[in-house]
Amino acid sequence: MYSWRGDSFMSTPPARSALLLSVFCPLSSVLCRLPSVVCPLSSLLAALLALGCSSDSGGVASGGWGKADDGFQAMLFAPRGVVRVGEAIELRVRVRNQVGEIRYFASAHDLTLKAARGEKDLGVDIDYVALAKEGIKMSPGQELDFPLRRYATAGAEAKLCQGEGLYRFRGRLGKLELPPVVVRVEQ
């Protein structure tokens, strides 16, 4: 069931979906030049992208990289950008070696995290954290992730984050800036 359409070779059913998708997603014409087995899957993917849908709606929320200090950069992120009320908000830090040589990253740092819900500041979490037992040897360009905090969103344990809303966290890990990351808590 193959037919020629213009200058491309496509199977008949995917050609119909490609015609519909070409209005929404210019990449659909490229995707539908793939073999007929792959084309329906790629057409579906193109349709989801064109409509702004994602199969990972509660995916990772990250705040971007902070300014480099002493050859290192840090990023605050949440493995789940959307959590339900009653589930904990998990925050992690990713550290990257920015220089072209092997460096040792200190294992313990002062941590300052500021939390806000909308425009309202909720408070500051200040602590001294140990990321590892000893200094961490990092190759050039290497990135490592470390758990930082888990904030309860309901119950007696929920001191900083209580209930639904958009929570914004930012702060510092030692001298490293941690740009804001936003996590949504919903029912």
Image: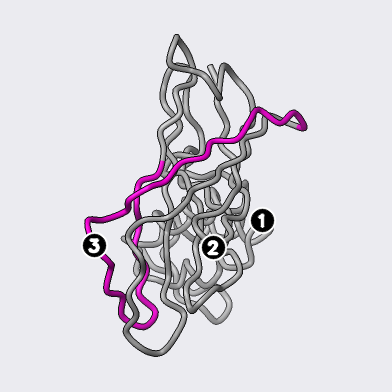
Give the labeled residue for mark 3: 134
As helix, strand or loop, the secondary structure at mark 3 comes to: loop
Query: Residues under labels 1 and 2: Cα distance?
Result: 42 Å
As helix, strand or loop, the secondary structure at mark 1 comes to: helix
Give the labeled residue for mark 2: 176
What x and y, as percent, mark residue 33? Answer: 45, 72
Give the labeled residue for mark 1: 24
Which quarter shows the N terminus? bottom left
Q: Which residues are magenta?
A: 119-148
Q: Does the magenta stretch mainly form a helix, a strand or a loop?
A: strand
Q: Residues within 10 Å of mark 1 (few under 14, many from 20)?
A: some
As helix, strand or loop, the secondary structure at mark 2 comes to: strand
Q: Which amino acid lies under the numbered mark 2 shown in the image of this protein?
A: Leu
Q: Which amino acid lies under the numbered mark 3 shown in the image of this protein?
A: Glu
Name the residue at the bottom extreme: 100
Residue nearest the viewer, comparing 104 with 158: 104
Tag nearer the camera, 3 or 1: 3
Q: Is residue 134 magenta?
A: yes
Residue nearest the viewer, comparing 1 with 44: 44
Name the residue at the right extreme: 119
Tag nearer the camera, 3 or 2: 3
The vertical placement of 178 against 82, above or below, is below
Residue nearest the viewer, comparing 57 with 81: 81
What x and y, as percent, mark residue 41? Answer: 39, 54
Query: Residues under labels 3 and 2: Cα distance?
Result: 19 Å
Q: Which amino acid lies under the numbered mark 1 shown in the image of this protein?
A: Phe
**Mark 1 and mark 2 residues within 8 Å of each other at the beta carbon:** no
Q: Quadrant of residue 12?
A: bottom left
